[in-house]
Image (cartoon, rainbow, N blue to C red):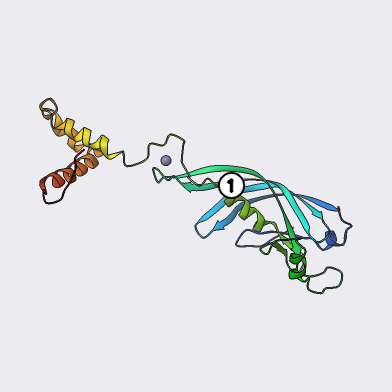
Amino acid sequence: MVIQAGTFMIIYNVAQLLKDAVGGHRDYDFAEPSLELSEDMTATYVSGHVRLTRLNKSVLAKGKVVASVTLQCRRCLEDYTTEIATDYEDRYYPTVDVSSGHPVEFGDEAANGEEEVDALRIDANHGLDLGELLRQVIILTLPIMPLCREDCPGLPPPIGVQVHLSNAADTPDEDEDGDEDDDAPIDSRLAALAHLLEVDEASQSVPFSKN
Ligand SMILES: [Zn+2]
């Protein structure tokens, strides 16, 4: 296994495996501090297992991976870290024939229905970059709607609640000790929204339903 400095890559040299009979396989464990998923997202504590199996025209990479990924909650916009764990399985296709050294005609194999156009490739030095597959697998495992927790209340609260609170503050009973509340941080937002509502009410030129 060769680990290249900089961006995370786990590359297995599969030259010997490609010379094995179909069904030959190698097993590896991996554990890396980080894996860049995209320009602004990185997985950390990436570990797992892979079995590389020689197939007729490809190498099957199959195993498990666990990793931590920091995401931004869609409701409260705070960063949070989530753990992902998933099985994966995909085929890598040689670009060079390991025996002859000649380039493998990718198009012919695709015509036989053996592989997809965007298939993973083994490089010309017979290096199989598992990081490429792990990156795809981890990204696919991430939630479409990231939430720091199921019942995250998020910010800001629904407008209806704020209208109710601002009206409550106008009642005579609240006015006596209302000054202290106005200085509280959470009320400053409500005050700002209440002010916006007052502006709406004042500008009668715009048709506006208060219901
Ligand atoms: Zn949240």
Image spot of residue 197 (x, y percent): 18, 43
Work out whether 112 lies above or below 60: below
Q: Quadrant of the C terminus?
A: top left
Q: Quadrant of the N terminus?
A: bottom right
Q: Which residue is at the far bottom?
A: 102
Camera-side residue of 158 and 1: 158
Q: Left or right? Give the position of 41 relative to 97.
A: left
Location of residue 56 (image quadrant): bottom right
Give the residue type at disc 1: Thr
Q: Left or right? Give the position of 23 relative to 51.
A: right
Q: Residue at x 78, y 57 (%)?
A: 59
Q: Does residue 46 appear in this view? A: yes
Q: Left or right? Give the position of 93 relative to 201.
A: right
Work out whether 161 lies above or below 61: above
Q: Which residue is at the far right?
A: 21
Q: Which residue is mark 1?
A: 141
Camera-side residue of 137 and 57: 57
Q: Residue at x 60, y 55 (%)?
A: 35
Tell me which image quadrant ligand 1 sits in. top left
Camera-side residue of 34 and 147: 147
Work out whether 97 lies above or below 177: below
Q: Left or right? Give the position of 33 relative to 108.
A: left
